[in-house]
Amino acid sequence: MGTTLKLTAVGNSVGLILPKELLAKLRVDKGDSLYVVETASGVELSPYEPEFAAQFEAAENIMRENRDVLKKLAE
């Protein structure tokens, strides 16, 4: 089941208060950044920048595919 969050006034803007449990799941705290990504099913909040995450995933794939070569280079 999902959690309902209420929007609140913050000066001239509107803010969203995240419960401690959700902050813990996201592994973020006051002052951290969250990234908003539009997906096919709606909007996603993530502590990870999508472009960096994609680049990191590509790097992991390359490292996995070339594990033996990288190990030899490290020697």
Image: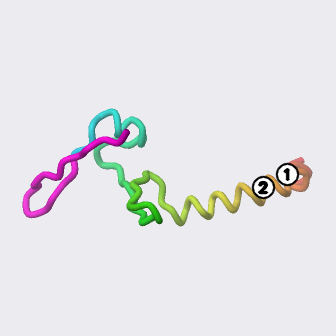
Instruction: Tell me where residue 23 appears, x and y as whole percent.
Output: 35, 39
| Amino acid type assigned to the residue bearing label 2 in the image | Met
Q: Is residue 32 left or right of residue 66?
A: left
Residue 68, given in percent of the width and then of the height, sits at: 90, 51
Determine which quarter of the picture holds residue 15. Answer: bottom left
Q: Quadrant of residue 22?
A: top left
- Side (left or right) of 32 relative to 54: left
Q: Amino acid at mark 1?
A: Arg
Which residue is at a point 8% across and 63% down the rendered structure image?
12
Q: Of residues 4 and 37, which is closer to you in this image?
A: 4
Where is residue 66? Give x, y as percent. 85, 57
Mark carried by residue 67 = 1
Residue 4 on the magenta span: yes
Quarter of the image with the N terminus is: top left
Which residue is rendered at x = 56% and y = 59% of the image? 53
Q: Residue at the spot x=60%, y=63% of the render? A: 54
Which residue is the site of mark 2? 63
Q: Is residue 25 left or right of residue 18?
A: right
Q: Residues within 10 Å of mark 2 (few under 14, many from 20)?
A: some
CB within 8 Å, label 2 to label 1: yes
Question: Which residue is depicted at the point 25% across and 44% down?
Answer: 4
Magenta-highlighted residues: 1-16
Residue 18 lies in magenta, yes or no?
no
